[in-house]
Amino acid sequence: MRLRKDIEMAELAHGAVQQVVAAFLRKHDPMVRPAPHDELFASGMVNSLLAMELVGFLERRYGIKFTVDDLDLRNFASLSRIAETVLAKQAASAGAA
C-alpha cells in the first residue's frame, strides 16, 4: 500500500512540474500548448534564450541548481523530461542535505 501511495505522489509531483513549466511557456507565448511528450526545441516552442530563462526560473522555483552536465538538451526536450530532471535534482538535493 505504501509503494502505491509513493507512486501516486510521484505522479502528482511530475504532473505539477509539467503544469508549472507549461504555464511558464504560455506566459512567453500564449499560443504555446505543449503536450507532455512534445519536442519543445524541435517544434520551435523553445529556443536557446527561452531555455536559459526557463533554467533560471526552475532553479528559483524549486530551489535547485543545475550544473553544466544537467544542461543537456535531452533533459529539457519535453515537459515530461523537464519534470523528471527537476524531480531528480530535488531528490539529489534532499539526499545531500
Image (tube, rainbow, N blue to C red):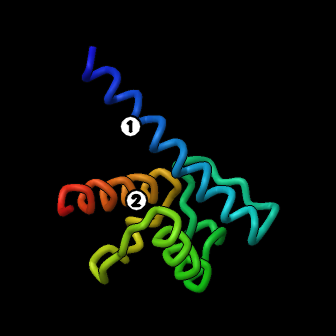
In the displayed structure image, the side of residue 69 where residue 19 appears, left or right: right
Q: Is residue 48 above or below residue 77?
A: below
Q: CA distance from mark 1 to mark 2?
A: 12 Å
34 or 85, nearer to the observer: 85
Q: Amino acid at mark 1?
A: Ala
Where residue 10 is drawn, which disc sits there? 1
**Residue 67 % position (x, y):** 30, 79
Q: How many marks?
A: 2
- Element on which disc 2 rests: helix
**Residue nearest the observer in this picture, 86 or 30:** 86
- Residue in the image at 46% along x and 62% along y: 62
Nearer to the camera, 38 or 26: 26
Image x and y of residue 34, in percent: 65, 54
In the structure shown, which secondary structural element does the residue marked by tag 1 occupy?
A: helix
Q: Quadrant of the C terminus?
A: bottom left
Instruction: Please report the residue visible at 48 percent of the width from the left and 36 percent of the height from the top.
Output: 12
Q: Quadrant of residue 70?
A: bottom left
Image spot of residue 87 (x, y percent) = 37, 53
Image position of 7 (left or right of 94): right
Q: Residue furthest front?
A: 97
* Quarter of the figure with residue 90: bottom left
Numbered badge on residue 86: 2
Identify the image quadrant of the N terminus: top left
Q: Residue at x 64, y 56 (%)?
A: 22
Amino acid residing under circle 2: Val
